Amino acid sequence: MAFINDQYLELQDSYLFSTIAKKVNEYVAAHPDKKIIRMGIGDVTRPLVPAVLKAMHDAVDEMGQKETFKGYGPEQGYSFLHDAVQSYYKSHGVDLSSDEIFISDGAKSDVGNITDIFGNENIVMIPDPVYPVYVDTNIMAGRDIVYLDSNAINNFCPMPPTDDEIAPDLIYLCSPNNPTGSVYNKEQLTAWVNYANENSAVILYDAAYECFINDASLPKSIYEIQGAKECAIEFCSLSKTAGFTGTRCGYTIVPKALTAFSVDGDAVSLNKLWLRRQTTKFNGVPYIIQKGAAAVFTEEGQKQIKENIDYYMKNARTIAATMDECGITYYGGDNSPYIWLECPNNMKSWDFFDYLLNEIAVVGTPGAGFGSNGEGYFRLTAFGDADNTVEAMERFKTLYKK
Ligand SMILES: Cc1ncc(COP(=O)(O)O)c(C=O)c1O
């Protein structure tokens, strides 16, 4: 008789995007002539840039020649991409060695898979609201989760607990944050790094949106903070940075200075464990994709992706300016592609969703879908088409402009 991992039965069904899709489909069926503008799901709309396309085309040609064909590659990624990521980190003052960089097929897989190398007895701290993958992957492993309130009082940048009774071993932080758009500054991140080092905890730092940070005083990487290499793993992605949501490539940094304890009390290198995990369960990212990824970090690639990032950030400014004009409180939108707004007139998230859909045919994401503290909030994304974003915000003003 085969048994399942019973922890899967503990997972809540993920209704968020399926419910949104169902409601939108019903609306479309009832109003076939109305133009819906989608500002909900966090996928990008700008295509891959020319530098990436050229590198991938060249790599395809290499694969067709006996002399340049590539079979299995190194599980942790090719050295040319390590070098590119290393130089990128160097450009914001972080020195990494090549074997601290692990190329992945995106941040989602690694954020989930990293749980493999940690014992199930760890207590996990996760902010609420949050990117749902952190919660679900730890439920699958059967770990105890303590939630950290992220709310208007702490500007959606929750700080380390002061209550000694709460002693997390693993701490998830995401900055710039999905869904709230908030970004930790250096002082705040220093407090987290000190807290983790003092309590022998490990921070799992999701920097998937680092490329949207404009303000040079804000950290793009947790390793800009002294002491972070002793307590943090960082996850990064080219999905939003360079339109790789369908192409799939990211990277995870596991510093060699980082350790956690065995049951016998020995300090064990997490870098070694992660290498062991990856070489056992992962066979690397395709050569063609890694070539495209490396092109993102060239001078030309950086210039081209910046145009796309600027395009999205212009959308973010359009949305933020509309909220200002309408007197609606919001977070994010300046160093993040997400605008997290307080639903007007104390509306609940799903009521506001229905209202926007029915009144102006604009689709966003109800904050309640990201955790209980998301109730009463709503997420709009800047990843849409610029003309549609302008049109959506004109429609929005018809409801709320004073
Ligand atoms: C906070 C956060 N981390 C990770 C991911 C996943 O990124 P990837 O496409 O690299 O798997 C997302 C995607 O939306 C995200 O919002």
Image: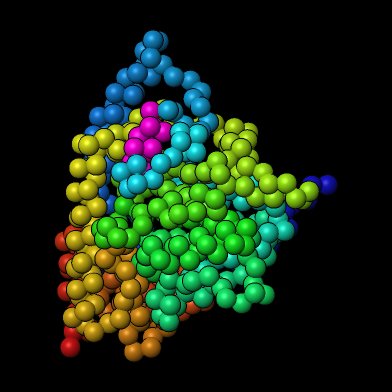
In this orientation, which residue lies closer to the viewer: 66 or 19?
A: 66
Tell me which residue sits at (41%, 61%) in the image. 175
Q: Is residue 95 visible from the viewing direction of this image? A: yes
Rendered location of residue 35, percent (x, y): 23, 66
Over which residues does the magenta segment extend?
Answer: 80-89
Tell me which residue sits at (40%, 66%) in the image. 187
Q: Is residue 30 visible from the viewing direction of this image? A: no
For residue 83: magenta?
A: yes
Tell me which residue sits at (38%, 86%) in the image. 347
Rendered location of residue 240, percent (x, y): 34, 51
In this orientation, which residue lies closer to the viewer: 116 or 59?
A: 116
In this orientation, which residue lies closer to the viewer: 6 or 257?
A: 257
In this orientation, which residue lies closer to the viewer: 186 or 342?
A: 186
For residue 354: magenta?
A: no
Rendered location of residue 277, percent (x, y): 62, 38
Pick the quarter of the image with the C terminus.
bottom left
Tell me which residue sits at (25%, 29%) in the image. 54
Is residue 402 found left or right of 338 in the rendered image?
Answer: left
Is 276 rendered above or below residue 71?
below
Rendered location of residue 178, percent (x, y): 41, 63
Query: Which SS does the magenta portion mostly show?
Result: helix
